[in-house]
Image (tube, rainbow, N blue to C red):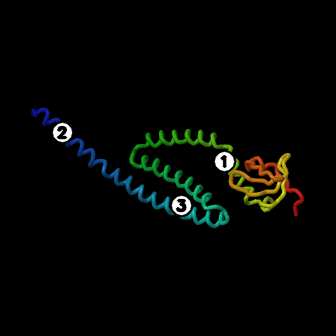
Amino acid sequence: MTALQSGLLQRALFDFFDRLAAAIPTILTGLVFVALAAILVKVVLGVLKAVLSRTMRGESPVYRQFLTTIVAVFLWFGVGLSTLSVVGLDGIAASLGTAAGFVALGVSYATSDMIADAVAGVYLLRDPDFEAGDTVRVGDMEGVVGTIELRKTRFSVGEDTVVRGNADIEARWTKVGGE
């Protein structure tokens, strides 16, 4: 190895270690931020689970877990973007946030009917005037409410079972011969 190559290698190594030493405070700041954020996320998810178990006591645990998972994904994504900003990678954080926004917009558009059914299902599940065993009319169909699920409701119409999306039902049902 020539003296010139040796000098270049030595200067490159010194430059690398100088930059590494200068980055240590930023890396430690990022690690401390992630640790504190993880504690906060765990506390928020614990409170959310407790609230959902009290407010959705009669519901299937799948619904509570679904809601908790959605909140967890949003929280951890926020922690990830914030961590990138804390360590000085604001441009990457902004790009990822923008890209995620477009993906979320596409997913929400693609699942808008499913979301509408789920929201209407929550209203129907909480409505004391719409319960299993009630006879109701929805449009031109009249039947007995069999089961009310988050996205759809099953009716007994004669010997048939009719399944309708909750968004179709919630806006236009009428109780027949109600108490």
Query: Which residue is under mark 2?
Result: 11
Outermost residue to the front: 159
In this view, the residue in front, 69 or 98, is: 69
Q: Kindly identify the residue that appears in the image at 57 percent across and 42 percent down.
A: 104
Query: Which residue is under mark 1?
Result: 115
Q: Is residue 55 left or right of residue 138?
A: left
Classed neighbour count for the residue bearing mark 1: other residues with Cα under 10 Å, few (<14), some (14–19), many (≥20): some
133 w.r.t. 104: above or below: below
Q: Quadrant of the N terminus?
A: top left
Give the amino acid type for the residue marked by disc 1 in the picture: Ile
Classed neighbour count for the residue bearing mark 3: other residues with Cα under 10 Å, few (<14), some (14–19), many (≥20): some
Give the amino acid type for the residue marked by disc 2 in the picture: Arg
Q: Quadrant of the C terminus?
A: bottom right
Classed neighbour count for the residue bearing mark 2: other residues with Cα under 10 Å, few (<14), some (14–19), many (≥20): few
Disc 2 to disc 3, C-alpha distance: 50 Å
Mark sitting earlier along the chain (2/1): 2
Res 47 quadrant in image: bottom right
Measured as percent of width and height from the top left, residue 94 is found at 48, 41
Res 147 quadrant in image: bottom right
Mark sitting earlier along the chain (2/3): 2
Disc 3 to disc 1, C-alpha distance: 22 Å
In this view, the residue in front, 66 or 104, is: 66
Q: Kindly identify the residue that appears in the image at 51 percent across and 63 percent down.
A: 43
Q: Kindly identify the residue that appears in the image at 43 percent across and 46 percent down.
A: 85
The local secondary structure at tag 3 comes to helix
Tell us which disc is closer to us: 3 or 1.
1
Query: Which residue is under mark 3?
Result: 45
130 w.r.t. 8: above or below: below
Q: Kindly identify the residue that appears in the image at 70 percent across and 55 percent down.
A: 149
Measured as percent of width and height from the top left, residue 15 is found at 23, 41
